[in-house]
Amino acid sequence: MTPIFFDTWGWVAIANKNDIHHKDVFEFYKEFLLSRGVPITSDYVLSETFTLLKSRANIDGVIQFGEGLLQAISASKIILENITPPRWREAWELLKRFRDKPRISFCDFSSFVVMRELDIREVLTNDARFEQVGFGFKKLF
């Protein structure tokens, strides 16, 4: 199974039934899990996800979704990569390198670091910036 990094966009589309991409992304997620895929994400991505969901959805639903993710992480059904100090420094270097791309968030730079380190090429996102940096990443939506 090809490893896939799950970005904030993907988690929000999965969790938020009002998201215009929810149906397609949720179906992709179900098929991915049924084929024994294990999503890979980061603590920064989940932080960004919960912050965004809190502004768009009912807090009880956000908590329920978060608890489900935490249970899946504990059961090794989702791999949670932490942004360690060395990864943080590398993301900082990318921020400086791509100073001409102000719309790329620090969270995205940290995701690029994890994806490069783990040799992950595919990302569950609709964010074109993953493809614009020239690291060979392919967005799935």
Image (cartoon, rainbow, N blue to C red):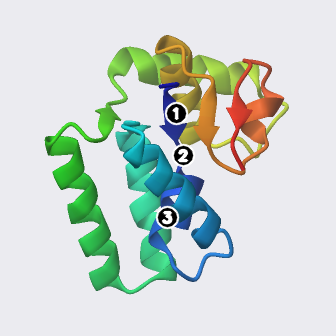
Which one is in front, 88 or 53? 53
Q: Position of residue 80 (x, y in %)?
A: 31, 36
Whether 138 is drawn above or below 19: the answer is: above
Reading the image, the residue beneath label 1 is 4
Q: Are marks 2 and 3 in contact (CB under 8 Å)?
A: no
Residue at disc 1, secondary structure: strand
Q: Position of residue 136 (x, y in %)?
A: 74, 19
Q: Residue at x 63, y 64 (%)?
A: 24
Q: Judge left or right: residue 81 versus residue 89.
A: left
Q: Are marks 1 and 2 in contact (CB under 8 Å)?
A: no
Q: Residues within 10 Å of mark 2 (few under 14, many from 20)?
A: many
Reading the image, the residue beneath label 3 is 14
Nearer the camera: disc 2 or disc 3: 3
Disc 3 marks a residue whose amino acid type is: Ile
Residue at disc 3, secondary structure: helix
Rounded to the nearest whole Å, what is the CA distance between mark 3 and mark 1? Answer: 15 Å
Disc 2 marks a residue whose amino acid type is: Asp
Which one is in front, 24 or 64? 24
Q: Quadrant of residue 106?
A: top right
Q: Residues within 10 Å of mark 1 (few under 14, many from 20)?
A: many
Q: Residue at x 82, y 31 (%)?
A: 132
Q: Kindly identify which numbered label has been placed on residue 7.
A: 2
Q: Judge left or right: residue 75 versus residue 64.
A: left
Q: Earlier in the sequence, mark 3 or mark 1?
A: 1
Q: Quadrant of residue 40?
A: top left
Rounded to the nearest whole Å, what is the CA distance between mark 1 and mark 2? Answer: 9 Å
Rounded to the nearest whole Å, what is the CA distance between mark 2 and mark 3? Answer: 11 Å
Whether 42 is drawn above or below 58: the answer is: above
Q: Quadrant of residue 19?
A: bottom right
Q: Position of residue 50 (x, y in %)?
A: 39, 63
Q: Residue at x 85, y 31 (%)?
A: 100
